[in-house]
Structures are given as structure tokens and as C-alpha cells.
Image (cartoon, rainbow, N blue to C red):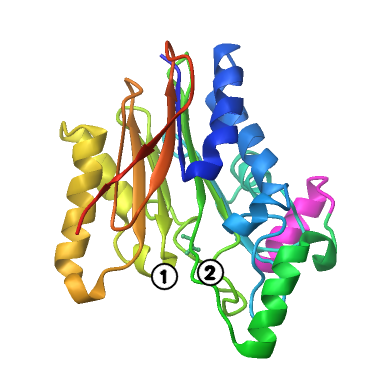
Amino acid sequence: MAAAAGTWTFSFPALQRMKGLLLQGALATDCLEEAMADIENDEVTGSFVVGRGGYPNKDGIIQCDAAIMEGQPGRFGAVAALHGIGTPLAVARKVMEESPHSFLVGDGAVAFAKDQGFTVEDNGRMMSTHSTEAYQEYLEKGKTVKKHDTLGLIALDVCRNITAGVSTSGAPFKYPGRVGDSPLPGCGLYADKEVGAAAATGDGDMIMCFSPCFHVILLMKQGLSPMDACQNVVQDILRRMGKENTFELGIIAMNMKGEVGAASSMSFPYCVWSQGKESVEQLDATITA
Ligand code: GLY
């Protein structure tokens, strides 16, 4: 059974891409990296806070976070505060596969990417007209953008390999060096081939306080469906925070049967596809109040 899931409606083309590749028998990690790169490297989708054309930090530099986790134990790679590279998830994969480390940040991550043959571009080439205008408004009027989107993808291939990946340019106009939930294992993503995988989106400064993706996997391991596990985790977090301190959080999860669930504290569309289905579907997560 092959299947794929992605956060937000802008994951739709990525799901279509993964569907095609998975049906050809491609490996989960390869599908996910290719589909992610199409969106990360497109300055138009940068306005969804991902990769090229994403929002810069308060010094005007686009710094991206990305991570990949395979279901095999010990297979994780991440980068954070990475600048000048349009495909941060591909660098995270290289960290996983070609380095003795699991997580590289800032200039060290850029130097590693260069060593691996990535071209490091000037920040001006990473910025789009949209992100340049948004940054100008921030400088001139202090106008910030309340966006915390992350492209999170999950792929399950016909050989039962499961992989989760996430990529984001992080909180718009963030303090330089700020890292969100996305690249942190258990917070922005988690994968376990005996159980399934999960990915999160929303306010990373808060999400990282709860390791929600690891929690979802634990509940699925205890027998909950992906939908029930996501709902339980979001409910638990919101109950502990109290109504007045609600923050943006959306989670998607998939089990090894290719079943997908999602839950959120906000309006949160997500995309799913599984083998046997003609097309990619767009669904709305249950909102937990
Ligand atoms: N969830 C993405 C971030 O806050 O950086």
C-alpha cells in the first residue's frame, strides 16, 4: 500500500508528484525529497513560508529550517537557520546520509551544503518580489505577518518504507538564528516504521514545548487510529494551555496501513492520497476548541 499526506492546500501539487512517483515504485524518501524541492524552490510558493521567496528574518535574510526522518531507527537529518539554498530538505537528507551528525545549523550547515555540491546563492536571489515588499513594510511600518506555515509531507512506499519531511522559512521577521519546531525530532516530525509518521505545522515557538509528533506516534503505538491520536494530542495541549492561551497547531499522521488523520486548533486543510484512489483529496482537519 502506497500513500502520501501533506499539510495545507499548497501541498496538493507535491501530493500529485508523490502519487506518480510512488505508483512507479519509487522509494518514500526519494519521492518526498523531489516533491518537497518543487515547492521549496518555487518563489511563488515561498509566500506560504517555505524556501525560496519565503519570509526573511529581521535582518532581511531568509533562513530556512528543514528535516527528514525515515521510519528505520536512527535515520534523521536536519538543518536550521540555513541561508542561500533553495532546497533545504535535500541538505537535511545529506546530513542524514553523508555526515556523522544529525543536525547542522547556520554557517556550518551552509559550509556542509557547499561541500556536498550545493550552490549557495546570494540572499537577493532567494527573495521574491513578494518577500521583498513584505520586508519593506515590516521595516517602514513595523507591519508583521502572522504566518507560521510549514510544508510537512509523509510518504509510504510499496516496500513499507515510511518517511516524514518538513520545510519552512520559519516565523516571518524572526530574530536571526531563531529555530522553530519543524526540524526538531518529535516536535515538527517523527517516523517509526512499526507505527507510522507525523508532521506538524503552526506556531513553532509553542509547538516545540510539547513534542506533539512523538506523542502522536506513541498513541498510535498503543493502538489509536491516526485521527484519534492527532485529536487526543491537540486536545491535551489545548487543555493544558487553557482557552485563553490557544496557539496555532495542526498535525497530520499516517499509520502503516496508509490511513491518515489530522487535528488542529485552527482552520487546517490537508491533502491525502492512497493507492487505489484516483486523485489527491483535500480535507479539513477537525478543529479542537
Ligand atoms: N512551524 C514553523 C515555525 O514556527 O517555524
Check mark 2 vs ligand 1: CB closer than 8 Å? yes or no: yes
Q: Secondary structure at mark 2?
A: loop
Quarter of the image with the C terminus is bottom left
Identity of the residue drawn at 43% across and 15% down: 277
At label 2, which amino acid type do we have? Answer: Ala
Q: Select label 1 or label 2 by which is in front.
A: 2
Badge 1 is on which residue? 205
Q: Which mark is residue 220?
A: none
Check mark 1 vs ligand 1: CB closer than 8 Å? yes or no: yes
Identity of the residue drawn at 63% across and 60% down: 64
- For the record, the magenta segment spans 106-119
Q: Which mark is residue 171?
A: 2
At label 1, which amino acid type do we have? Answer: Asp
Near mark 1 (Cα within 10 A), the count class, few <14, some 14-19 or many ≥20, is: some
Identity of the residue drawn at 19% across and 39% down: 228
Asked if the residue under mark 2 is in contact with the one under mark 1, i.e. CB atoms within 8 Å, the reply is yes
Tell which of 20 and 199 is nearer to you. Answer: 20
The quadrant holding residue 236 is bottom left
In the displayed structure, does residue 258 sit left or right of residue 179? left
Quarter of the image with the N terminus is top left
Question: What percent of the width, then of the height, locates residue 9?
Answer: 49, 42
Question: What percent of the width, then of the height, locates residue 157?
Answer: 48, 19
Q: Earlier in the sequence, mark 1 or mark 2?
A: 2
